[in-house]
Image (cartoon, rainbow, N blue to C red):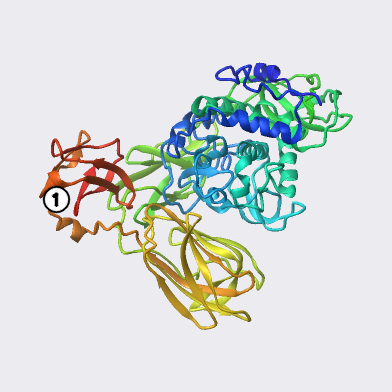
Amino acid sequence: MRKFSILLLGLLFSITLAQAPATYYDGTTGLTGAALKTKLSQIITAGALDKGYDGLWDAYATTDTDSFYENDGSVLDMYSENPTGADPYNYRHGIKKCGNYKNEGDCYNREHVVPQSYFGKSRPMVSDLHHIRPTDGKVNGMRSNYPFGMVANASYTSANGGKVGSSVSPGFGGTVFEPIDEFKGDIARMVLYFVTRYESKLSGFGGQNMLGNTPYPGLQEWEKVVLMTWAAQDPVSAAEIVRNNASYVFQKNRNPFIDHPEWVEQIWGTQVVDNEAPSTPTNLALISTSTSSAKLSWTASTDNIAVTYYKIFVDGTFHSNAPTATATVSGLAQGTTYTFNVAAADGAGNFSSQSNTVTGTTLIDNEAPSNPTNLSVLSVGTNSIEIQWTASTDNIGVESYDINVNGQLMGSTNSTTTNVANLNPSTTYSIYVVAKDAGANMSGPSNTVTATTNSIGLNCGEENFETMPIGPSTYSTYNWTSNGISWTSEDSRTDETLNGRAIMIRDGFLTALSAPNGIGNLTVTTQRKFKGGTGTFKIFIDDVDTGKTIPYGDAITTTTVTGINISGTVEISLVNSSTSNRVMIDDMKWTCYDDGLATGETAVSNSKLSVYPNPVKNGELNVSGKDLTNIATAQIFDYSGKLVQSISQPFRNSNKIMLKSLPKGVYILKAGTQSAKFIIQ
């Protein structure tokens, strides 16, 4: 088999920073199959650093910045990127990190392409940059821990076309997630990296709908076929090479299937020698241009085996790949003349000569959209404010709206309503929006609205299932949003009633995807319907089994489970322990996380501990109280109950605490049995 030329790829992409050292893959020559996979596992494990889960946020600025599509410095998100036009929304690095969400565009988080639940959130897998990407929180939640596959009839479709639904990939009929074509190869190579690096650990992992439990092949046969197909259809892109190089700088190892894409076939495929290049594409034509893109078409090439994709060159430099003989080249500057060529490639890495050249000039748009009007607040929660406005107009078209909170850009959306999430409780915010068109022209600001988020109460979440989708008497996957929380259910139906409408679970689960302020106690009403026996729902928080259960039987039963008590934004799942009992769930509610600080306003005001100045200035907290020198540990919690700083012997030398770089918001200081609230502005 003929290998891709790494030198050629390097020349095409003009990327030299932190490429693989010449000796990095020593010892792989002549190896195939399981032997090559094991050797690569040794290479990419040796010397790899674990920078921690929080370290990923720092890495993303170098690994996942959009310099390839809009080229606007935003977060490059596989789940929201529109490769042929304007993104439906975007994120700025470090701003609008999840946090709770209601809609797409509310916040972004860290998506484990191989789900955390498969390996129990253990390190180093949980913080391995090579399979963890920044993605929209809502889409990440809807993807859940499903394997990757092809979907025919989607139960959920994201704004950029990602789909959740029943698999039509041969060999598996469960629920899968299908990303858009542009990123199928990226995802395939990330999963293949994972099962290669961690091949010796696979026997202890879950996720056997996707992963294998032996070092080779490391995947279920059906999933292996899906990923190999995607890797061939969507070859290595310039963005992947940049990410691989930056990841090597960050954690000192590489994804070998980006450096050597031919190894996918050499490890998992049938060895076929192919040294024949495809024919040259002909009749390249420019169909149309916009302010930022050009649409091309050409006559397809032929090959002795098969043409797998085409490489598109802009002004002589590689730009992107296309799976078919048409493509929209995006990320262009307006009013600029470009030349275009294409070349064909086969699965063995043979390249044709370049096609004829065409020239085209992008359009110019200097007219800004009108100002958005009638901005108003729809609802307010403890961590979010939902807003809506009247759409702007433009001579060509409005592409998106920037959301500004307290003068800071929080993100963008192409809708006229959004949920501004990841806010602090009991805090006042001023919000306005600005419209943008494809030519980067910006309107003036809308009117400004002001709203104050709610304080944290005892009741954190409640669902009566009255607003979930109405379906037939068949079992399926359902997704909906209620009271600011996104829900998903599998092997379920929505046509039954208990205390009003109820969700019925068979061999599946019910999940609240992003619940702010944690969970203390959980109350659920249940009843088994039709034939069957007694059983339980297991309670999982963030994919971890709590060991606590909700019982059910043929009688209507309301159960309160106490002492779950997990802080932060949580994912709450009820998983049926039976594969056949059909059980209704209704009137589900839970209390907030209780950290034992008595953080309600009354308890805080009665504390004997005091802090000054308040609001805090210069990152220095002065503390007064009884017997401070006897306190062994001081802890600082944000107002969602998350521990953000711990200090041993805090008052041994003085009554001052030097704070870490904490963001603006409300915090609780706990020192011994005393506590006090303070504010960072």
Labels in figure, total: 1
Quarter the C terminus occupies: top left
Work out whether residue 83 or residue 499 is closer to the camera in this orientation and state it.
499
Q: Quadrant of residue 522?
A: bottom left
The residue most toward the right is 304
Work out whether residue 277 or residue 400 is closer to the camera in this orientation and state it.
277
Percent coordinates x, y for residue 287 in the rendering: 73, 30
Percent coordinates x, y for residue 646 in the rendering: 28, 43
Q: Residue at x 49, y 74 (%)?
A: 551
Q: Quadrant of residue 80?
A: top right
Quarter the N terminus occupies: top right
**Residue 264 appears in the picture as rendered:** no
Is 584 drawn above or below residue 665 in the view shown? below
Work out whether residue 628 or residue 617 is closer to the camera in this orientation and state it.
628
**Amino acid type at mark 1:** Leu
**Residue 463 appears in the picture as rendered:** yes
Percent coordinates x, y for residue 258 in the rendering: 65, 29
Percent coordinates x, y for residue 350 in the rendering: 80, 24
The residue most toward the bottom is 555
Residue at the spot of label 1: 609
Q: Residue at x 28, y 45 (%)?
A: 665
- Label 1 crowd (10 A; few <14 / some 14-19 / many >=20): many
Work out whether residue 481 or residue 506 is closer to the camera in this orientation and state it.
506
Badge 1 element: loop
Q: Horizontal placement of 617 versus 381: left or right?
A: left
Q: Residue at x 30, y 35 (%)?
A: 661
